[in-house]
Image: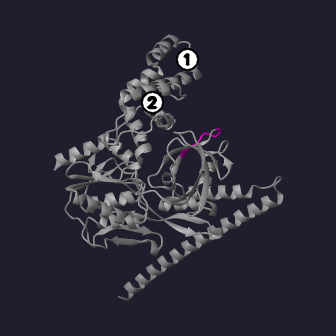
Amino acid sequence: MHKIYRLIFTVSLVLTTAGAVSAQSRDFKLGQWTEIHNSIVKELSRSYVDTLPTDKMMRAGVNAMLEQLDPYTVYIPEEENEDLQMMLSKTYGGIGAIIHKVKEENVIINEPYSGSPAHKNGLQCGDEILEIDGVPTKGLETKESSDRMKGKPGTTVVFKVKKVRSGDTLDVPIVRERIHFPDIEYAGMLDDTTGYILQSGFTEGVAQQLKDKVISLKGKGMKRLVLDLRGNGGGLMSEAVNIISLFVPKGSLAVSSKGKTAGSSHEYYTQTEPIDLDTPIIVMIDGGSASASEIVSGGLQDLKRATIVGKTSYGKGLVQSIRPLPYNGQMKVTTAKYYTPSGRCVQGVGVKPDVEIDVPSYSRLVYSLVLGGVIDQYVLHFARNHDSIAEVDEYHFSDEDFEDFISFAKTQDFDYRSSAKATFDKMKEELEEDGLTEVMSDELAALEKALEMDKERFIRLKKDEIVPFIEEEIVTRYWFQEAGVKIRLRYDRQLAQALEQVSTAK
């Protein structure tokens, strides 16, 4: 027995000593590199031929260092704290409107938010902002214009506005407010028994909002719930746990985290009584569903409380914490990995759906019209020429309207090549580099002719793809954000398949 005790003591001593040596080695290396870094900076400051761009150098060095870890560990200097606040709480101080800005033109109000200071003071899509607090907007960059419109809630900003309908120019003073982008973008009934909630974030209080919406939908006859987390990049872990708590027995393990320090490893159990243990739940996810979205979908999946539908999620199984730094800076640092109730870590893997449904694909032309701003510009054109439209449930973009869009799009400069034509052009460049275009000139000419399609013909061919995007943008300008969601639901083939397949499976 004494030999066994001595053996255990010896092994423990070796392990403890090895751990201490390893820690000392890490600390030594850190101190060594810190000394080297400081010496380099001091020597550059003393002997470099030109004045050092110190701020630029140091920021680049810090960014490069953190990039070696993961995409989520970042340094936030004091001047970017507002951006951090926006990221964490989806709030900012301002007037609540999306703007359109071309440098040599005035600011255009593109989309005021419902109930925002912009909306309450009569700003509407198409209004031109000529001046912000006496500063002309022509010549300003988009960010500079936006920054001038933002500010501390309670302060006043004065706009000189040219109204889109009357053409009148007037001064409009607006008191800034704390603008919050809602995490619950829409909640309603898809039919007599199916409730639908679109959730886009996990900021503080969203679980309570979701609870209220679920109770409201049950009062309207909901017998099954669709929780749409597609594109939801996540947020607070605590809110994810609180959402799981709504649907599973109190005391259930919702998620666990494991980190380097004792304080970063936890098991999180549901703390409140659920509001619903029986209503069937469909959770929709895709490649944009990350972090807290994966905690909710993975947790409800493991606890057999929901059917997960869509495509595999993003795979961000990391926990970030905010740490204060000198001079009012902060660092968002990865401190742990999280695990679903069954012990799965989704980092780099994602939550795999129970029912996989492909995401609809769109043609290259549609991406070009959307990302190139052609549809956005057309909607401004439309708003200038239409005082009103039908209510969202009755609104449809007519054939006459589509002809107007074609006429507008033909005047715009954008890449309207098909994917095949773009691939052909790339292939032709490579053949030219290889010196093969002459020997293949006849074949290339014939293929190019077959692939050529004029702008109008291609737009007409893709009408069914284009119209839903135009309809969504138009109704958003007249009936605000929820109206846009209703239009998306009108054309949501993935959602329709989900409802059909899950119903069939049962």
Q: Which dot marks residue 365? A: 2
Residues packed near mark 2 inside 10 Å, few (<14), some (14 to 19) or many (20 plus):
many
Closer-to-camera residue (184/127): 127
Residue 253's image quarter?
bottom left
Query: Can I make out residue 67 in this image?
Result: yes
Q: Which dot marks residue 57? A: none
Q: Which dot marks residue 436? A: 1
Q: Is residue 26 left or right of residue 340?
A: right
Residues packed near mark 1 inside 10 Å, few (<14), some (14 to 19) or many (20 plus):
few
Give above or below for 224 relative to 486. Answer: below
Q: Identify the element where label 1 is drawn.
A: loop
Q: Is residue 200 located in the magenta-colored stretch of the structure?
A: no
* Measured Cα–Cα span from mark 2 to mark 1: 30 Å
Give the x, y percent position of residue 31. 65, 70
Give the x, y percent position of residue 264. 45, 71
Query: Can I make out residue 344 in this image?
Result: no
Closer-to-camera residue (33/22): 33
Quadrant of the drawing holding the N terminus: bottom left
| CB atoms of marks 2 and 1 within 8 Å | no
Amino acid type, label 2: Leu
The range drawn in magenta is 99-104
Closer-to-camera residue (12/80): 80
- Kindly identify the residue that appears in the image at 45 percent across and 75 percent down: 262
- Kindly identify the residue that appears in the image at 40 percent across and 24 percent down: 460
- Observer-side mark, 2 or 1, equals 2
Amino acid type, label 1: Leu
Closer-to-camera residue (318/141): 141
Q: Earlier in the sequence, mark 2 or mark 1?
A: 2
Give the x, y percent position of residue 468. 37, 36
Which secondary structure type mostly characterizes the magenta part of the structure? loop
